[in-house]
Amino acid sequence: MRSAPDTPCAAVLIDLDGTLVDTAHDIVAAANRMLDELGRAPLPFDTISGFIGKGVPNLVRRVLETAGVAQGGAESAEALFHRHYAEVNGHLGRVFPGVQAGLAALQRQGCRLACVTNKPRALAAPLLAMTGLARYLEVLVGGDSIAQMKPDPEPLRHACRLLQAEAAHSVLVGDSAVDVAAARAAGMPVFLVRYGYAGPGGVAALGADAVIDSLEDLPALLAPARRIRA
């Protein structure tokens, strides 16, 4: 874990895929089921998992491009993906080690917690419920909750408004360049988990305020004695 200065914390906003839950196997299975229905061969796990993190429309588009499917069918392909993903959602994924303990510690520390994800809310909500993580989170902002998705800062600002917390006194925890860009634009610190879907090169070069091995490391980076509530 790289050291970071104490961070006053009104709220902790946390990404979902690659940060709270390892959902790559669910996503890859759904994408390959979509390709099968379109009469195409499956793509390798590493290829599809490399497209995770910028929302379903981007993932489907990249999968279609790679499989050589005409882009004119993107809308219908996206509907296929959603149908297949709803069938496998949470069946192959797993909560990353340390997540539940870290969330419980943050809750005891008094931080208000939200999940901010580019995953559609209809998929994110049941996943958080079936993994038992929903009980720690006061707010869920999905990729279709508002008009913008990360890396736009508005989903982070929207979560802060719902929690009645100032963005400058909150922190985002994620696993990718998308999370770093969103947090910087929102004016809040960003911590990245070392695992997840950062892609080639990992998280070290992405310019986060801290890199952590587990969510259990996060409470120690925050400053309970100086916590500021908006």
Image (cartoon, rainbow, N blue to C red):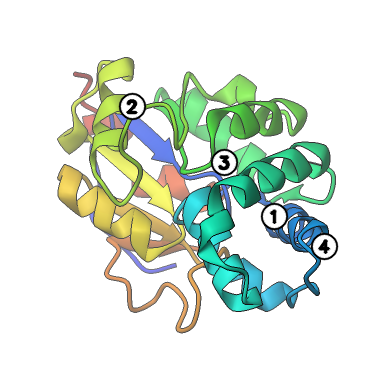
Q: Please give the residue where the numbered disc 4 appears in the rendered image.
A: 36
Q: Nearer the viewer, mark 3 or mark 2?
A: 2
Residue 71: horizontal and vertical position, in percent? Answer: 52, 63
Q: Which tag, 2 or 1, sits closer to the chain's start?
A: 1
- Calculate the distance from the C-alpha at mark 4 to the C-alpha at mark 2: 37 Å
Left or right: 44 in relation to 113: right
* Residue at 25%, 46% in the rendered image: 152
SS for dot 2:
helix
Residue 130: horizontal and vertical position, in percent? Answer: 76, 29
SS for dot 4:
helix
Q: Which tag, 3 or 2, sits closer to the chain's start?
A: 3
Identity, as a three-letter code, of the amino acid under mark 1 = Ile
Q: Which tag, 3 or 4, sits closer to the chain's start?
A: 4
- Calculate the distance from the C-alpha at mark 3 to the C-alpha at mark 2: 20 Å
SS for dot 1:
helix
Identity, as a three-letter code, of the amino acid under mark 3 = Gly
Instruction: Characterize the local packing of mark 2: few (<14), some (14-19) or many (20 or more) Cα atoms within 10 angstroms.
Output: many
- Calculate the distance from the C-alpha at mark 3 to the C-alpha at mark 4: 39 Å
Q: Tell me if residue 91 comes above or below residue 72 in the rendering.
A: above
- Calculate the distance from the C-alpha at mark 2 to the C-alpha at mark 1: 25 Å
Q: Please give the residue where the numbered disc 3 appears in the rendered image.
A: 102
Residue 43: horizontal and vertical position, in percent? Answer: 73, 75
Q: Which mark is residue 27?
A: 1
* Residue at 60%, 67% in the rendered image: 64
Instruction: Characterize the local packing of mark 1: few (<14), some (14-19) or many (20 or more) Cα atoms within 10 angstroms.
Output: many
